[in-house]
Amino acid sequence: MWTRLSNPGHFMRWSGALLPWLAGLSAAGLALGLYLSWFVAPPDYQQGETVRIMFIHVPAAWLGVFFYGSMALSAIGTLVWRHPLADVAQRAAAPIGAAFTLICLVTGSLWGKPMWGTYWVWDARLTSMLILFLIYCGIMALWRTMEDPNRAARAVAILTLVGAINLPIIKFSVNWWSTLHQPASILRMGGSTIDSSMLYPLLTMIAAATLTGVTLHLYTMRTEILRRRVRTLTIREAERLDAGAVAVAPARVGAVPLGQAL
Amino acid sequence: MRLTVTNLAVRRSGRRIFSGLSFGLGPGEALMVTGRNGAGKSTLLAVLAGRLKPEAGTLAVADVGEASLPECLHVVGHRDGLKGALTAEENLAFARDLLGDPALAPREALAELGLAHALRLPVSYLSAGQRRRVALARLLVCRRPLWLLDEPTAALDLAAQGVLAGLMARHREAGGLVVAATHQALGLDEARELRIERPEPDAPRVPRPGDAPVASGPGLEDWA
Amino acid sequence: MIGTIRALVARDLVLAARVGGSGALSLVFFLMIVALVPFALGPDLNLLSRIGPAILWLSAVLSTLIGLDRLFQADEEDGSLDLMTGAPVPLECVVLAKVTAHWLTTGLPLALASPLFGLLVALDGTAMAGTALTLLVGTPALTFVGAVGAALTASIRRGGLILAVLVVPLMIPTLIFGVSAAQSATAGTVPFATPLMVLAGLSLIAAVVGTAAAAAALRWSE
């Protein structure tokens, strides 16, 4: 079942059938979530209307981490099973994850202005997200510098896994660093207790955003597969033309095995 | 030792270099790999040396104990693996310590190739032909049953080519194997020839509903 | 196996000594960055001595970076890596030996020279010793993390810049604990041993993960 679904040809078929539904569902989910968070959820008694930034900020942060996790899983797929779709999935996830991480950083900074009076505070969570964004940038940069897709897939998979091992360490050290430098941090984002009137809109937004992210991911994967098809077909066409050009030479077919049978 | 290669297929950057390549080599046998430039001679040697992963096919060695294929061969190729800042002796001594199973001392190996005077010279002072001979001397400092030679006569004069032919003959008499990619005759007696030709381009395939799903193995890159 | 590793380490040490090596160069680079900071911040010795450990650590991170790009690339270009693939040891041992040799020629001199450079930023004796000790414990982590990037970019021409982009985010934890350990040697609320232990742990983790990942990147690198 799984191997059937993950064959590129099958993938194109089922994802093509699924995509319109997913797109519609995520649009509806986003509309509902935005309605809830803008009109239904009450303003915060301390932060006022600015708390509504949270309904974008938190889902974006979650998706930034979520896509890194999915990239790490795909990296294992690339390294262990050498599965072609794993590489496609990873490649498609990187820009989306980076974009959500960037959204998280921008909204966090906008939220910071009314809360802290400045656009950027070296808050532990924001700093961790910034480092995550830098790692995303490194991964995408490595992809761009390697021409051969197979080598790039392998290299990026290794880098992603090393990053995945490092992320908890980074999170831990940034927390340590932040408590060291701001021992009395009164303003924590989100907070541990959240009223249900805000929780449900937030959960709706997270679900809708995840759905949107998955839709985008499938769509990008399809684009990537098509791009590789074009590449393969172009190479074959070049090989075919080349073979035609040297047809005057006595061309034998394939590699000629030795006289001796094995 | 015995080397058996079955149905080897290699792709680089999505291009098929060759496929369905099979041969076997027993003790004392030699194989000359010929073909046009870019036909995949060096690629085949890189696969044998373990530097390139084949897309499909198997490489098997027998009668060498537990050693893997890269551990029972010598490679001398275009990139000679010599450090210019080290002397010829140091380069050879390093190869001997790295690869294990020492045979000749660096001094004797160099003398075999007529380079005894270069023993204490930094390799960067040597000409291309001399460097190639230092690299060939590596074949003698440790005992390994399979020699992979990529254009071994490039940059060698006639006398050195004769020396090389003698070395290969002796190696084969002792039960060694030689695989050489070459454009010209190497003086290998009774060597078999493997001619790599341009493969036929893959026939364009349209995925049909009944296509068997492929999870691994050949055809992984068949995106079309 | 030990003989093979010893041969590799010895060769890289000899090469580093003969070619004039990246070791001496990265030491000069280290000095230059330390010398740059007062020009940017002003020659206020109180300020400099307060941020001195941070300056030294930042310089150490940067000068580790510049020597890394040739770590595997030089051997990849001249075919020595093909030779090493044939060695009767796993590629991990080759990587471990090469990285050890590289640390001995770059990280170790950096740590040993840091007290001298500490004078430039007005560190007192305790702070100097603390910084040198943290560099001694922490630079292996930098080198091993950097080795992953060096292996990934071994076959890329001009891979130096991309190497920096890849590995700098991964070096942040080492920097954090290195600086915080160095600073807690003289002041602060944290006992010196705590961040130092974490730093040692980071070096060990980096040694394991870095060796495995770099070997995986070099294997079938073509």
Image (spheres, coloured by chain):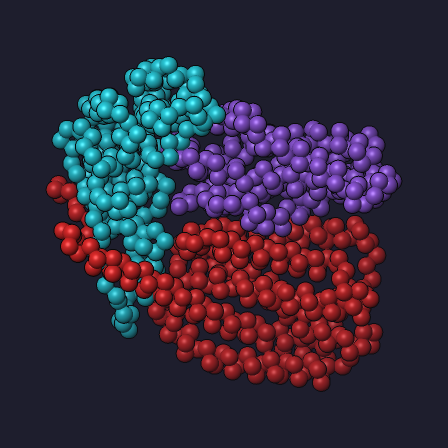
Chain colours: A red, B cyan, C purple
Does residue B174 appear anywhere in the picture? no
Left or right: residue C136 versus residue C94 is right
Q: Of C190 and A231, which appears nearest the observer?
A: A231
Residue shown at 69%/28% (left/top)?
C112
Residue A61, position as x, y percentages in the image: 64, 66
**Which corner quadrant holds the N terminus of chain A?**
bottom left
Question: Compared to A98, does B35 lie above or below?
Answer: above
Q: Is residue B31 left or right of residue C34?
A: left
Q: Picture coordinates of residue A52 (x, y %)?
A: 73, 76
Please determine whether, in this image, residue C220 is positioned above or below residue B210.
Answer: above
Q: Nearer the viewer, residue B142 or B166?
A: B166
* Of the pair C139 and B134, the residue shown nearer to us: B134
How far across and how far down the image is residue B150, in percent?
Answer: 29, 35
At x 41%, y 76%, the residue is: A16
The quarter holding residue B173 reads top left
Write the residue at 39% across / 46% down. Answer: C222
Quadrant of the drawing holding the C terminus of chain A: top left
